[in-house]
Amino acid sequence: MRTLKLAAGLLASVALPTVALATDLEVTHWWTSGGEAAAVAELAKAFNAGGDNWVDGAIAGGGDTARPVMISRITGGDPMGATQFNHGQQALELVQAGLMQDLTDVAEANNWKEIIYPPSLLDACTVDGKIYCAPVNIHSPEWLWLSNKVYEDLGIPVPTNWNEFVASAPQVEAAGKIPLALGNQNWQSNLAFGALTIGVGGLDLWKKVNIDKDMDAAAGPEMLVVFQAAADARKLAAKSTVQDWNQATNLVITDQAAGQIMGDWAQGEFQVAGEVAGKDYTCLPGLGLNEYISTGGDAFYFPVNKDPEITAAQKRLAAELVSPEVQVAFNLKKGSLPIRGDVDLAAANDCMKKGLKILAGGNIVPAGDMVWSPDVQTQLGDLQAEFWKGQEMTPEEAQARYVEILKSGL
Amino acid sequence: MAGTVPKRRRFRNINAKIAAIPMVATTLVVFVGGTLWTILYSFTSSKLLPKLNFVGLDQYERLWGSSRWLTSIHNLMIYGILALVFTMVVGFLLAVLMDQKIRFEDTFRTIMLYPFALSFIVTGLVWQWILNPDLGIQHIIREMGWTSFAFDPLNNPETVLYGLLIAGLWQGTGFVMCILLAGLRGIDEDIWKAARVDGIPRWKTYVFIVIPMMRPVFITTLVIVASGIIKLYDLVVAQTSGGPGTASQVPAMYVYAYMFQAQNLGQGFAASTMMLLSVLIVLIPWAYLEFGGNKRG
């Protein structure tokens, strides 16, 4: 019996290479929530339709948990076929160490330079003139989500920007509700701060600090205004005791909290709860002050593999990910924006349409992951965690530490 | 002295010595080698991949200037001292009670030891729920009618460490009890008889005779508990993930965050070297007492 199995196994391993194109490709990612899994299924379906086999390697626990696993597999000599990263500097050293497949030929064959919009997405994939990743979607974190019902009950109009939101907060608080819902995890306060930087500080300041790395601007009075706004926000969020971001979103959905600063992925939660954009909740990109969104998002990288068949399959997948059909199917399920401007998302809801309009208008900035290293990002997260946890740290102190951290990443 | 060792002695038990070679090699290469490698690279500016570009003590300077690291150390000291004192005292008291020739001792011992069979992750999650104001103790007591009752240690930076401590004690005390109970059973029955003949009260016998006799057991327990405290990680991750803010950060979380999330190996290695140092501070006095003491005896 055992020899029979062994023989069958041997036979199968001999037979495999003769089946044309049917290459198994393991793809690792951290998309495990309901909506995310449905979106990944679209990618797998498209890839399998081409005759290959998508082997799903989902890693639960979010990017912070998944990335170390992925990196140690790649550096440890057990590379997967393809892996998700946020495009930017997360995989930069792996590329520089020659561990990632060069996709320049695929990009040229499919004219990525022309179709990928905004071009900064492709720039984030480019190292020394060569392209190393295939962007799949755009997520922007600079959104303020508001519960319309909280304001209707108070008899005041729903705020249209951050300043009105702060002004209305005492009334919200008097009604026994939490003005601002905020999860107790570092990345969430970091995200809120990022949104305030663009919303309150404006684009010029953001660019000066994050792109030109102008440390005088980071230490200047305009940036102090941002830190003061963050101190306001911290006061408004003092009564929020939840941990996860979706629990905080749930406070807004159930009208216990007036608003939340969260990325566009939050609208998936509103949709699942059966709420309608514009009627039950309001979304304000760029906090309603400066309608800019940053274009972070996800991309797939393809670790270098010795097997030429896998390399060929990797290139087929890369081309597939950027194709218009996959972009539409994937992004509708994911609730994110497509990476090309020439596809039609007619089924998109109000908030997604707002995002698309801003994108088409070109009011976009690169994401933090693209301009600062993970080391700086982690330190900034630590600073924000400390700043937001109590009311002790003054905006001035926080700003001084902020400048120190940015300097360490120059 | 070494040169005068007779050849015969060096080749005595030759088979046993050959058999020990794989173990010695593993220890040298994996444990000592890995440790030295880590220390060496903690003096470099390695980011995602280890590279040998030395930067001197820069990583250590940054480490000791980082307020997250200082908070971590501070938290670990508070947690460590309290956990050490409480597990030892409570564990010993339970062991003494257990030693009173009670009925169903096996059952009680099993119940007390059960929490230790759970991993820290499970312990942390269970206690996160129990201490959650909307699900756990606070909720139940409010349901019973005391609506002003408030018990929410995990969401307050001032009290979060005690929330961790509750879970840590629940998990670890039974284990300490079992070791100390075994130690108590190792005390010769004749000693008790002699103490009784001399008319010494039971508590005095425990404090002045039994505890000093149990010194080796106590020291071993102390080392096990202390090294468990220094590497404290999974309990915090499961219960609070270091929050609120940085109020319950511990050094092991810093090491992980900087090695893998921040992609800054040098910084992570520097932090883990400091952790190694603190383990050594615990271990060296123990080794001295254990092995140094034998020579005198």
Image (cartoon, rainbow, N blue to C red):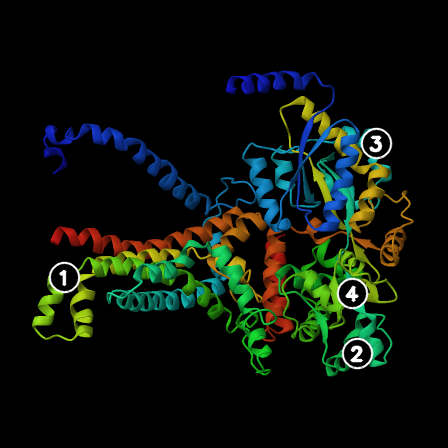
Horizontal arrangement in the rendering, residue B132 relative to residue A169 (left or right): left
Marks 2/3: CA–CA distance: 51 Å
Residue at image mark 1: B189
Q: Nearer the viewer, residue A78 or A125?
A: A78
If you read the primary sequence from the N terminus, does the residue marked by circle 2 or circle 4 appear first? 4
**What's the residue type where badge 2 is placed?**
Ser
**What's the residue type where badge 4 is placed?**
Leu
Question: Label for residue A168?
Answer: 2
Marks 1/2: CA–CA distance: 76 Å
Horizontal arrangement in the rendering, residue B45 relative to residue A226 (left or right): left
Image vertical order of residue A323 relative to residue B134, above or below: above
Residue at image mark 3: A110
Residue at image mark 4: A144
Residue drawn at the location 82% of the way across and 54% of the way down: A364
Kindly indicate whether the residues beneath marks 3 and 4 are on one polypeptide chain.
yes
Marks 3/4: CA–CA distance: 37 Å
Residue drawn at the location 80% of the way across and 51% of the way down: A335
Residue drawn at the location 15% of the way across and 28% of the way down: B11
Kindly indicate whether the residues beneath marks 1 and 4 are on one polypeptide chain.
no
The image shows residue B130 at horizontal and vertical percentages of 53, 67
Direction front: furthest residue: B103
Marks 2/4: CA–CA distance: 14 Å
Image vertical order of residue B24 relative to residue A360, above or below: above
Mark nearest the camera among 1 and 3 is: 1
Q: Nearer the viewer, residue A359 or A176?
A: A176
SS under mark 1: helix
If you read the primary sequence from the N terminus, does the residue marked by circle 3 or circle 4 appear first? 3
Image vertical order of residue A294 relative to residue A69, above or below: below
